[in-house]
Image (cartoon, rainbow, N blue to C red):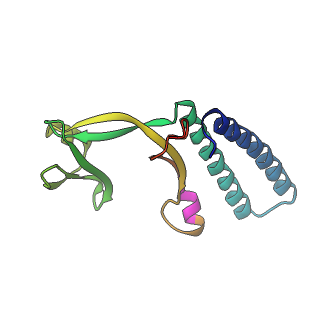
């Protein structure tokens, strides 16, 4: 497996080649007067590929790590906080280290309850998340996400 500078250079070259190919493909499809749906699908696919390569390059340039948020209680113990869209908007499900579960509607309320949001640097990598749905809807709602990784792709460990 490639890592560090070798992987960084490979991804930069892939990004450069992809941008050139995507532009040429766009101009070819435009000249052929492809239908709008085809143009949107190819354009979105090219955009996601570029963003994925850019995210991976950024992670490698930062030493193979990215910052991730986590929450602690007033004693410094980590707690589980998961955000989700509920019936009335965005909510948080909180599970403290004693197993107590409750829900709240904002980070400000969590902080008023004595919970503290912190940030740490961890090994990371990027992928395309399929979004909400299948087919065309899935493509339009897809995005690039950065996730915690067991491997630091800069160091290879």
Front-most of residues 2 and 80: 2
Question: Which SS does the magenta portion mostly show?
Answer: helix
Q: Quadrant of residue 35?
A: bottom right
Identity of the residue drawn at 87% across and 60% down:
32
Considering only vertical position in the picture, is 37 above or below 60? below
Q: How many marks?
A: 0
Residue reaching furthest bottom?
A: 134
Horizontal and vertical percent position of residue 10? 70, 40
Magenta highlight on residue 75 = no
Horizontal and vertical percent position of residue 131? 50, 59
Asked if residue 38 lies left or right of residue 106, the reply is right
Front-most of residues 130 and 66: 66
Front-most of residues 19 and 89: 19
Identity of the residue drawn at 13% across and 36% down:
75
Front-most of residues 79 and 36: 79
Identity of the residue drawn at 82% across and 57% down:
29
Asked if residue 82 lies left or right of residue 21, the reply is left
First to last magenta residue range: 137-143
Horizontal and vertical percent position of residue 48? 62, 50
Magenta highlight on residue 139 = yes
Horizontal and vertical percent position of residue 142? 54, 56
């Amino acid at each position: 497996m490639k890592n560090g500078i070798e992987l960084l250079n490979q991804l930069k070259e892939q990004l450069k080649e992809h941008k050139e190919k995507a532009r040429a493909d766009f101009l070819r499809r435009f000249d052929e007067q492809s239908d709008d749906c085809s143009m949107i699908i190819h354009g979105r696919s090219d955009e996601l590929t570029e963003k994925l390569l850019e995210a991976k390059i950024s992670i490698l340039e930062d030493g193979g790590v990215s910052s991730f948020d986590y929450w602690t209680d007033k004693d410094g113990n980590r707690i589980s906080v998961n955000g989700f869209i509920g019936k009335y908007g965005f909510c948080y499900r909180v599970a403290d280290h004693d197993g107590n579960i409750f829900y709240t509607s904002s980070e400000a309320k969590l902080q008023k309850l004595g919970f503290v949001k912190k940030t740490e640097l961890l090994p990371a990598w990027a992928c395309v998340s399929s979004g909400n749905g299948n087919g065309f809807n899935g493509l339009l709602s897809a995005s690039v996400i950065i996730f915690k990784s067991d491997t630091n792709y800069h160091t290879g460990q």
